Amino acid sequence: MPDRPLVGVIMGSDSDWPVMSAAAEALAEFDVPFEVGVVSAHRTPGRMLDYARGAAARGIRAVIAGAGGAAHLPGMVASATPLPVIGVPVPLATLDGMDSLLSIVQMPAGVPVATVSIGGARNAGLLAVRILAASDP
């Protein structure tokens, strides 16, 4: 794999990794270089905005953002970057991820976020592969 990551896999908390690791595994299967990080829309908003605003300049071409509960991370990242953002609703003990799904899928006009199923990080990784392949077959 090249050293420079093409996909960012981010999550609101390190406790989201058991779900989000499936995205990383899918990217690795296709030898797509990626980076992994924890940035929270609520706990570290400045860091999240810095990440989103700087991702394209660092060579990132798509972002996979996983979050549970209020799940503002995918939408906030999408509002601050021109890159495609794929939202992964992370299931929590309460509501089984329905809250996250509805939060991510209901974006206002002008803030596009592709959304996969609850816990669907593998599909997010595969969608990122397709996004990359569409511009670099």
Image: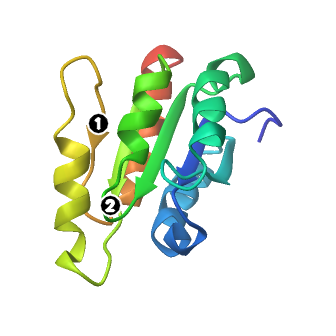
Mark 1: amino acid: Ala
Tell me, for residue 114, which label it has, or none. 1
Residue 60, x across and y down, in percent: 63, 27
| Residue 117 located left or right of residue 44 | left
Q: Residue at x 34, y 54 (%)?
A: 71
Vertical side of 121 occupied by 85: above or below: above
- The residue indicated by pointer 2 is 120
| Residue 23 located left or right of residue 35 | left
Location of the N terminus by quadrant is top right
Alpha carbon separation for disc pair 1 and 2 = 12 Å
Vertical side of 38 occupied by 107: above or below: above
Nearest the eye: 86 or 28? 86
Local packing at callout 2 (Cα closer than 10 Å; few below 14, some 14-19, many 20+) is: many
Residue 137, x across and y down, in percent: 50, 19
The residue furthest right is 3
Q: Residue at x 42, y 35 (%)?
A: 76
Nearest the eye: 101 or 60? 101
